[in-house]
Image (tube, helix red, strand yellow):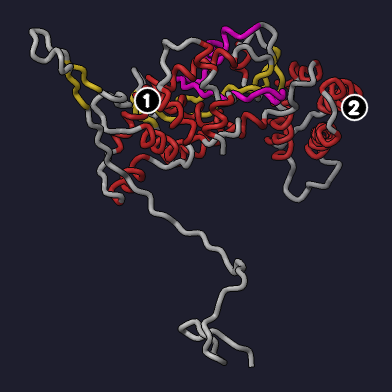
Amino acid sequence: MRPSLSACGTCSVCGTQMVPIGHEVIRTEIRYTEPKLERIEYIATTYECPRCKDTDEPQFVKDEGVPALIPGSYVSSGLAAHVMYAKYVLGMPLYRLEKDFVRLGARISRTTMASWIIYCSENYLQPVYQHLHRLLLKRRYLMADETPIQVLKEPDRRPQSKSYVWLVRTGDDGEVPIILYHYTPTRAGKNAEAFLKDAEDGFYIMVDGYQGYNKLKKAKRCCCWAHIRRYLLQAIPKGHEHDYSEPAVQGYMYCNKLFEYERSYREKGLSFKQIYNRRLKDEKPVIEAFLAWADRQNPRSGDRIIKALKYINGCRPYMMTYLEDAHCSLSNNLSENSIRPVVLGRKNWLFSDTQDGANASMTVFSMVETAKANGLDPQKYLLFLFDQRPSIEMTDDELDQLMPWSEAVKAACGE
């Protein structure tokens, strides 16, 4: 019979106290610790000079401590960062966050939180945003996309009017990523032109087929082959995906061939110079054959194939631009991935009440998405910025130390 421990820890055979002879992990569990809000009071101390106190000019000094993040407000750097993280990373509307704070014992209204976001964005995040914008305009490879949002209170516009978010980010060129968002009341191409007006001549920009990007006269425009392929995929009749006599299937296969080549270059770890040479050898003939195929198409019916061919013809001037420089991408997928957080967030918080709120939201989105792209914890990065209190008086060298790729920031905010 195998000996066992009794309730008192003695041997069941002889009654001797058992002693430990080894340890092993038998299971693990994850425990949830309830978050909490703490009220912190800052005490100011007043000092006097004991020698001068009985003179005609007694001397006093008051230690005011660190100023409040927002004058007259109880919000801390950590609370402001958490509110922004909840809304712009987790997609939580402020009214839900308001209810969560009530559960934690604090009544913080959504209006109050919105005012915090606007104030902190305008006073602390905007200097960082503007510095990132200046750095973005120096880059040679950019990508862009846009998506609609709703802003209720715009001058001379109905609340139901459609406004826009523009995304402009750096390309897949191996350098540090910068991702910026910009709100405008309309989708007019002049908005993209204004945002990029100080960019250097001859930069490359990867975009979809929207003609508003034609306003970018300084840019060499690349078209997105993923969009072309998507239009053709949608044009394939159901059940005919492997019918190679179907025109949309033929066009789709040309596009797939380009992506297969790109994938093989990455898997082989080719240099940019090698990619440039291989693209000319492998991909240029595919594009030429694709254009010849498109010229032969004259569909009499089928709205989707007609729509796909119309889109293809609109992209013709830009189809081969990416062949000029191997740092250019074949698709705009990075932009689509970067604009997705705005699209998902919009489904939850639905609209911005004012233009100030829309601008603040785009600034915060720019901070958190650029932080994530550089391997940072976005909430820690917001907290870091609020603790540092960036200002417009800072020099470019000082702002450089607050960039997501600086060594100090990576050490403080790494995931």
* Quarter of the rendering occupied by the C terminus: top right
309 lies above or below 193 = below
In the rendered structure, which segment of residues is drawn in magenta? 171-200
Image height of 182 relative to 214, above or below: below
Q: Position of residue 271 (x, y in %)?
A: 84, 25
Q: Is residue 178 magenta?
A: yes
Q: Earlier in the sequence, mark 2 or mark 1?
A: 1
Instruction: Give above or below for 231 relative to 20.
Output: above
Measured in 3D between alpha carbons, the distance from the residue under mark 2 to the one under mark 1, in whole angstroms, is: 51 Å
Q: Residues within 10 Å of mark 2 (few under 14, many from 20)?
A: some
Query: Comparing marks 2 and 1, which lies closer to the viewer?
Result: 1
Left or right side of 48 for 32? right
Residue 155 is at least partly visible in this image: yes
Magenta residue check for 190: yes
Decide: few, some or many residues near mark 1? Use Cα within 10 Å; few <14, some 14-19, many ≥20.
Answer: many
- Residue 370, position in %: x, y? 56, 28
Residue 282 marker: 2
Residue beneath disc 1? 120
As displayed, is residue 277 above or below residue 75? above
Front one among 39 and 296: 39
- Going by the numbered disc 2, the residue's amino acid type is Asp
Q: Position of residue 9 (x, y in %)?
A: 50, 82
User: Helix or strand or loop: what does disc 1 sit on?
Assistant: helix
| Rendered residue at 60%/30% (across/down) | 374
SS for tag 2? helix
